[in-house]
Image: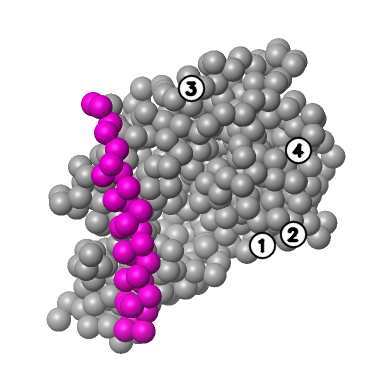
């Protein structure tokens, strides 16, 4: 792959640059280190162009050849879809999460927005280097010799329940991870507070972004003794059933990737909950592959 | 569902003008969560991680990645080698 310029979204940290630009509670705090994926890209000779709140816009305009993004909720990949770009979400554990601002740690993963699948996979090849700094890296994938990849369509198991499962786990995990933003240790805080609890509550009430406020409160609910079994534990059990069903679905369709319906709005829940890779192509084409068979997506993309 | 209790548990005191809107969104989420009430899991074990490598933890190893000065340099304000913060005790 030729050298390219690349940018990052707000959840990927770069030494000396703001952490989560646009989020008031981290305003003024800069990262002490650079995310592993960014280091790997620059070490491979690619030029880092900076952080952006609009990674897809940067790629679309040609300002950057690729954008590294952490898109657990599917917002960036839907944006890429609208702009006619490609978005590659790798298998969970393929890319080091060191240097990501953690939200849903069991699904957080760096993905790539680019103008074409070849570029996205070129970037993935660089950033999917094993990193002992991330304790949740997957075992190295075996060399792939499969040349012909088929495409199949199928009903998504437990489809109706996936948004609920995803949101419960997202809220529970995000609540824990963003609890560190308390008004003391990172960035900004509320003014004229009266004591420690007031400092925490008003800083988080006034400066944490709305998405994280909601996730924190809903996370407190699903992790509370009244709702733990009813919501959180049950969501993890449904995730187990879904995980197994996805594996069975791929096992029944040898050497094939799944084409998700173009109208399916919750494709991100499939990749997040099963840890499988997915590729969004222009024109509403959404493909998912078995875990660690990311390369199959590139082969399948050539059929479109 | 009364959302204020859970915002309090999360150490979040919303400004008055945001409370109604957030209460609405919180209750929409709660309704979504309630969908699982109709799901029978049949004794399935919870899935904690999609990685099927066991739950091997790294051995603890103390590593000094940063100096105090480097970390304080990332903060908005510091004073005498510590993070500067307002008075927090009565």
**Near-viewer residue (A249 or A75):** A249
Answer whether labels 4 and 1 touch (C-beta < 8 Å).
Answer: no
Distance CA(mark 4)–CA(mark 1): 20 Å
Q: Earlier in the sequence, mark 4 or mark 1?
A: 1
Return the disc, 2 or 3, that comes first in the chain's sequence. Answer: 2
Q: Chain of mark 2?
A: A
Magenta-colored stretch includes residue B23: yes
Query: Crowdedness of circle 1 by 10 Å Cα count: few (<14), some, many (20+)?
Result: some
Residue at image point 69% right, 52% down:
A80
Front-lying residue, A55 or B17: B17
Counting other residues with Cα less than 10 Å from the Cα at mark 3, is it few (<14), some (14-19), or many (20 or more)? some
Letter of the chain that mark 3 sits on in the rendering: A
Dot 2 crowding, Cα within 10 Å, few <14, some 14–19, many 20+:
many
Q: Which residue is mark 4?
A: A117
- The spot of residue A76 in percent (x, y) is 61, 54
Quadrant placement of the N terminus of chain B: bottom left
Which quarter of the figure has residue B14?
A: bottom left
SS category of the residue bearing label 1? loop
Q: Is residue B29 visible?
A: yes
Furthest residue in direction top, as rendered: A145
Q: Label 4 marks which chain's residue?
A: A
Q: CA distance from mark 1 to mark 3?
A: 34 Å
**Residue highlighted by disc 1:** A54
Q: Which stretch did the figure color magenta? A: B14-43
Labels 1 and 2 touching (C-beta < 8 A): yes
Q: Residue at (34%, 26%) from the top-left corner?
A: B55
Residue beneath disc 3 = A247
């Amino acid at each position: 792959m030729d050298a390219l310029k690349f940018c990052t979204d707000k959840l990927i940290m770069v030494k000396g640059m703001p952490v989560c630009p646009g989020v008031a509670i981290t305003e003024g705090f800069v990262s002490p280190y650079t995310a592993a994926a960014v280091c790997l890209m620059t070490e491979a000779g690619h030029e880092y162009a900076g952080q952006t709140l609009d990674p897809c816009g940067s790629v679309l305009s040609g300002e950057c050849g690729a954008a590294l993004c952490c898109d657990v909720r599917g917002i960036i990949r839907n944006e890429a879809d609208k702009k006619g770009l490609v978005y590659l979400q790798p298998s969970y554990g393929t890319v080091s999460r060191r240097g990501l601002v953690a939200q849903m740690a069991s699904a957080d993963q760096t993905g790539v927005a680019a103008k074409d699948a070849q570029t996205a996979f070129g970037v993935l090849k660089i950033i999917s280097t094993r990193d002992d700094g991330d304790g949740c890296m997957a075992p190295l994938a075996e060399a792939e010799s499969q040349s012909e990849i088929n495409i199949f369509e199928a009903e998504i198991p437990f489809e109706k329940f996936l948004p609920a499962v995803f949101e419960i786990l997202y809220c529970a995990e995000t609540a824990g991870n963003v609890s560190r933003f308390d008004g003391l240790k990172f960035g900004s805080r509320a003014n004229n507070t009266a004591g420690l609890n007031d400092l925490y509550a008003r800083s988080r009430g006034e400066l944490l972004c709305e998405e994280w406020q909601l996730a924190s409160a809903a996370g407190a609910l699903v992790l509370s003794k009244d709702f733990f079994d009813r919501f959180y534990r049950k969501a993890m059990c449904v995730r187990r059933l879904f995980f197994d069903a996805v594996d069975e679905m791929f096992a029944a369709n040898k050497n094939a990737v799944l084409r998700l319906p173009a109208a399916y709005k919750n494709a991100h829940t499939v990749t997040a909950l099963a840890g499988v890779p997915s590729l969004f192509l222009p024109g509403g084409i959404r493909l998912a592959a078995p875990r660690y068979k990311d390369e199959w997506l590139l082969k399948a993309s050539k059929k479109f | 569902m009364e959302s204020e209790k859970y915002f309090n548990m999360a150490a979040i005191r919303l400004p008055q003008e945001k409370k109604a809107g957030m209460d609405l969104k919180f209750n929409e989420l709660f309704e979504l969560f309630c969908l699982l009430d109709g799901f029978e899991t049949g004794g399935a074990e919870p899935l904690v991680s999609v990685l099927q490598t066991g739950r091997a933890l790294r051995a603890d190893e103390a590593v000094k990645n940063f100096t105090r000065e480097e970390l304080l340099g990332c903060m908005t304000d510091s004073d005498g080698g510590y993070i500067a913060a307002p008075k927090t005790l009565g």
